Image (tube, helix red, strand yellow):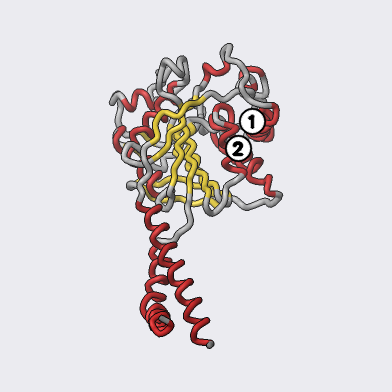
Amino acid sequence: MRHIIIHLGIYLQKKVAPFIVFLFSAGFLQASINTSVYVSAHQDDWQLFMGVNAYNDIVKSSDSSRVLIVYVTAGDYSDCLTTSDTQPVPYFLAREQGAKNSVELAANTHKQRYEWENDTVKIHGHLLLRSSYKFITCYFLRLADGAIDGQRNLSLRNFRKNRFANNYSIDSLTRYTNWNDLSTTCSNILEFETKNSNEIFLNLFDTSYVYNPNDHSDHYETALIFLNASNTMPVKRLVYEGYNSGNNRAANLKNLDIMKESALFAAYNQAMIDNNYPSIWNNDYIRFCDKNYFRLVSVEPQTETPHKKSVIGMFILLTLVISLFYYSVLTRK
């Protein structure tokens, strides 16, 4: 028996050990990674309507727990490029700074500050602005705000209904020829930013007029974009109530969570003040900070391949370790 174990150990050293190295390099033994995706029509949406979940995801973000935030519109109110002596920064840029402030507030609970890394990436033929703060990645698509009822000429709703073509980002960085072009781009963003994830959580507005009535048109449209963009992906979808949550809906957050959400919005609002825009710290907005209403609409089965790879890899590794242990013990005798 001892002779057999010794020969097995020699065989494992020469033949199996290199295979184990291959398994590691091929990703068979990779650690589990999850990504939480937040779809935001405007720069203050995730803070006000998804704030507690987003705050907690950002706080716990790490190499194995990523956060992706996609801002679809510029939130520009058709006044996107106007500046003045008192307001030298365009409104949409002030809003983007506010969104970054909110990210920093949650991420810096680790008592460590990071630097924003900004770049432009090409996805599906479109140049897109991307900003990353350690483990949090943000995309700014900068399409025109469509107003509550979606009646502005360049609204997402009119674009989806084919009432115009060639929807440009307000900075003219790119244009989308039709709704499918935009949807495919968003799908490619998801695939690119979650390609190594074992689990994906997609947070977006509820498109049901029963559960989420009277919401902003951009909320509905951005959700439709990403529902379509993710329809072939194994994601868990959490859908949130928007404006209606502030209308006679009971507070459902604990005191600590109310503080988290209020802090996120306060950080956002500070950018408005810093850039000489009116503060929006008023009841029209802060009435959302004591409540988050959402539901899990579907749980599509995650592909089992990464899990099975990990199990097989760990079994082989364990077998190798045990065999080498016995081999080393027996050869010393």
Q: Nearer the viewer, residue 229 or 301?
A: 301
Label 2 residue SS: helix
The mark that comes first in sequence, 2 or 1, is: 2
Image point (35%, 47%), residue name? 303
- Residue 224's x, y, as percent? 37, 29
**Amino acid residing under circle 1:** Glu
Return the mark for residue 305: none
**Could you give the CA–CA distance between mark 2 and mark 1, rounded to whole angstroms?**
8 Å
Residue 55 badge: 2
Res. 272 visible in picture: no
Residue 149: horizontal and vertical position, in percent?
43, 17
Point 47% across, 30% down: residue = 41
User: Which residue position is annotated with label 1?
Assistant: 261
Would you call the spot at circle 2 few (<14 residues within 10 Å), some (14-19), or many (20 or more)? many
Rendered view: 211 above or below 4: above
Q: Residue at x 64, y 34 (%)?
A: 264
- Label 1 environment density (alpha carbons within 10 Å; few <14, some 14–19, many ≥20): many
Viewer-nearest residue: 161 or 37: 37
* Residue farthest along the top direction in this orientation: 248
Please, what is the three-letter code of the amino acid marked with disc 2? Answer: Tyr
Residue 285 in the image, given as x and y percentages of width and height: 62, 21
Q: Nearer the viewer, residue 45 or 322?
A: 322
Q: Are marks 2 and 1 in contact (CB under 8 Å)?
A: yes
The N terminus: image quadrant: bottom left
In the depicted structure, whether residue 108 falls above or below residue 294: below
Q: Quadrant of residue 182?
A: top left
Q: Is residue 245 above or below residue 128?
A: above
Left/right placement of residue 186 relative to residue 73 reads left
Q: Quadrant of residue 247?
A: top right
